Amino acid sequence: MKAKVYKFGGASVKDADGVRNVERIIRMAVNDQMSNGLMVVVSAMGKTTNALERVVELLDAGKEEAALNQWVDIIDFHVAVMKELGLQPGSDIRLQGEIPYDPTLPFDENYDQIVSMGELLSTQIVAVYLLKQGLSVEWWNMPKLLRTDDTWREAKVDDEASRAVIRAGWDRPRRPQIVVAQGFIGGTADGKRTTLGREGSDYTAALLGNYLDAESVTIWKDVPGILNADPRIEPDTVLIPSLRYQDAVELAYSGAQIIHPKTIRPLENKHIPLCVKPFSDPRAEGSRIAADGVGPVDVPVYIWRKNQILITMRAKDFAFALEESLSEIFEIIHRHRLKVSLIQSSAVTISVCVDDTRKVSEAIEELRQHFNVTYNDHLSLLTIRGTTPAILEHAKAGRTIMLSQTTRRTARFVVKEN
């Protein structure tokens, strides 16, 4: 039998009851004796990542007291969960007293040192709780195992170095049946913690599945599986029980929140199926992504990508040589690490829709040195796969459309957020 990888997101461990439910799901897998070991990847609890990001922002703004208050709230929340689970803060689980902040470091490097604390705390809580419930468990410190470069906030993984050390730990004699590891974070050769990009825990699970030649990777979510729309936005959603790798990649890069965009490649390379299942109903079938998945998807799929900015560039002398300007534009975009979700050009303009990050204003200022630049913020990108005239009319009704693109199967609209 091969190993299995389970990944639990923040919603599944948002409180003590969530941790207890994780234990029940893991115990089911152990009792079923369906794998040669279980690798459990865990995200930060609930909205902890957002709260830690706020700590970094406050410190960067020089608001030390507010940052410390936020930090104390985060620690108090985790202490309360520990106590409800019967764990002893300080003895069962180490707590970080001081904020790991260095004012001499760049924002992004401080971000990785602070925000990574969420996963370190959550995984210690889960591992110790499982151990106290009588399970055979070991906690792994991923910053020492998953080797990355120092591209802060979006570190690139060294597969060769990571695979060697992780396989050595996994294949050793008398390894515990269950390993609990952090998603989202890794570490540099000189011991600095790094992060893999928001929602990067899915990617961690996929990498571990690849390194361990796993039988499968299962992502446990607060939805029945992969749906054709966000149930918080569209009231009538449909479960998509089976997808091919290529369909999943297209959905992920369009902005579907159910799967991190980098997740599919490590699995597709070794034909490892990816399952998405509800943690509220572990026996449910959920959705399965694999080479033999049924496809293409035969229902319309609606994908919202929030917090977008539409940037339009026009040459200052009105003579726009498209092929000459593209490389210059995208060199600037790449240097500021903007994520482009849509591109549209005309005879005299180029427009790009990008994620709204703290780097956008710097990129716009640099672009203005070469082009006339206008932009609109507070936008969303709606992608619809499997369109019909009726679906298009419904999608546009009552919305302010800033830009649209339509092909045979897919329509994309940049719209003002309500």
Image (cartoon, rainbow, N blue to C red):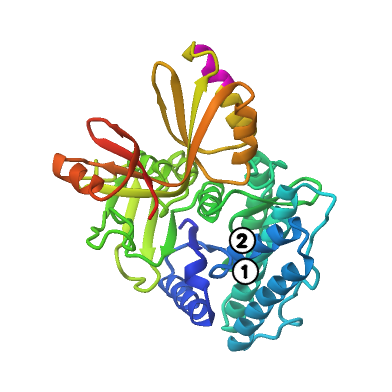
The local secondary structure at tag 1 comes to: helix
**Visible residue check, residue 83:** yes
Residue 217 lies in magenta, yes or no? no
Where is mark 2, residue-wise?
Answer: 182
Circle 2 packing at 10 Å, graded few (<14), some (14-19), many (20+), is: many
Question: Who is closer to the viewer here, 216 or 284?
Answer: 284
Q: Can you say whether 204 is above or below 351 in the image?
A: below
Q: Label 1 vs label 2: CA separation?
A: 6 Å
What are the residue bounds of the magenta stretch? 323-328
Residue drawn at (14%, 44%) of the image: 390
Point out residue 344 in the picture as x, y percentages from the top left corner.
40, 27
Amino acid type assigned to the residue bearing label 1 in the image: Thr
Where is mark 1, residue-wise?
Answer: 123
Is 214 on the left or on the right of 275, as rendered?
Answer: right
Point out residue 180 in the picture as x, y percentages from the top left corner.
60, 66
Q: Can you say whether 66 is above or below 82 in the image?
A: above
Point out residue 120 in the picture as x, y percentages from the top left corner.
67, 65
Residue drawn at (50%, 54%) of the image: 202
